[in-house]
Every structure is written in structure tokens, then in C-alpha cells.
Amino acid sequence: MRYVPAALLFVLSLYVPVAKSVTIGGNPGPEHNYVCPHADGQTAVECFFDAVQHLYTMCRNVKSIEVIEFGYEKSVEGTNGAKSESCLDKQKANIAQAYQAALKQLRQLKQSKPAIEGLQALHEMWLAAMTQLRWRDGEPDDQYKARVAKPYDDFNERIAAIRSVLVTETPAPKATLAESNTRKIPPSAKAKSN
């Protein structure tokens, strides 16, 4: 009799639904998606756009923690900057999959050279911004904070430019031959024939 509750719990545990993993731009998500958490159900290109800002924010936060922990001057001394260096390496690896998936999507859709070059330039801009998170000797607090916040504006401008290229290049759906050969009867003409 005392084994009945244990057996019942075991049987009920077999019927508990398992969380289904969704992919976004080649990455599992949304609950498991670290690379582009705000691009749920969107394309690989949108995942990459989200990853650029999200992963920059992750390393910016790590650098902020180092500054709080050690102060500006000591945040770059010895091993004090190890966390942000590790973050940079990790995020370079994390963004690689989203970047390659976005390039693949544009190439498969036969998007223009400007769209692909824009994506590549955004990736280069992201890499440069990530390496610029480090505090510079003698840099005042307000200048440092303004400098590390500026890439968001640059990212947004570049993303908007790429999106505008993609929108202008997306072909309008063509009407089929059958649709173009059918004569449209105005509603007033239908009423007169009845």
C-alpha cells in the first residue's frame, strides 16, 4: 500500500509535457535563446540584428561590474579585466552562428551586394565596439559612459540602412496569368444583372 503513491507519482510524471525548443536564426529559443532573445519567430537577419545589440550589452555590463569592483584605473590592471576579455571571446563565438545564418539567408534570397556588404560592415562595427569597451587612461567618467553608449546609435543607423535596402529589394508579389486575365465586375454591374 505504501508503494502506491510512489508508483502513482512516477506514472503521472510520464505525462508531464516537455518544453519544446524553438529555433530563431539557428539558435534555440526563446527560453533557451541567449544570442538573440528579442527575435522570437523572426528571420536569421533579424536574429543577427538583435544579437549585435544584445551581446554588446552583455559585455558592457561585465565591464561595468569590473569598474564598480576595481574602479576605472584598476579595472584594466593585471587580471582585473579578465572577465571582460573572457566576455569578448565568448560573444565573438556566440555571434558567429547568427552572423553566418544571416549571410546565408541573404545569399539564398539572392539579396543585393549592398545588403550583404551592410551586414558585413555591421559585424565589423560590432567587433570594433566590443574592443573599445575598455577604459582609456585619464578618461573622465562622463566621457567613458558616452563613448560606450554611442555604438547603440551606430548599430541602429546601420540596421535601419540594411532594412531599407532589404525592403526596396523585396519583389512585389506578381499576379498570376489567370488573375490578370479575369475581368473584374464592379459591384454596381452585378446588382443591375440581378
Image (cartoon, rainbow, N blue to C red):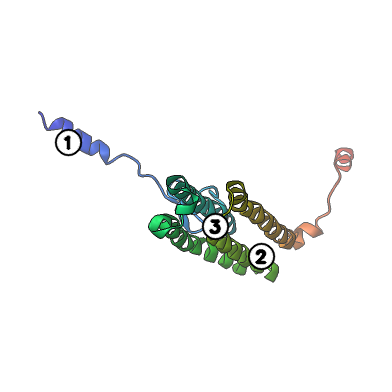
Q: CA distance from mark 1 to mark 3?
A: 66 Å
**Badge 1 amino acid:** Ala
Front disc: 1 or 3: 3
74 or 37, which is in the foreground?
A: 74
Identify the residue under disc 1.
Answer: 7
Local packing at callout 2 (Cα closer than 10 Å; few below 14, some 14-19, many 20+) is: some
Quadrant location of residue 178?
bottom right
Give the side of residue 139 with respect to residue 19, left or right.
Answer: right
User: Residue at left 68%, top 71%?
Assistant: 113
Q: CA distance from mark 1 to mark 2?
A: 60 Å
Q: Compare marks 1 and 3 and give the one earlier in the sequence.
A: 1
Q: Compare marks 1 and 2 and give the one earlier in the sequence.
A: 1
Callout 2: helix, strand or loop?
A: helix
User: Residue at left 35%, top 41%?
Assistant: 17
Callout 3: helix, strand or loop?
A: loop
Identify the residue under disc 3.
Answer: 137
**Badge 3 amino acid:** Asp
Quadrant location of residue 11?
top left
Tag 3 and tag 2, C-beta contact below 8 Å? no
Give the side of residue 12 with respect to residue 80, left or right.
Answer: left
Q: Is residue 155 visible?
A: yes
Q: Compare marks 3 and 2 and give the one earlier in the sequence.
A: 2
Residue 118, disc: 2
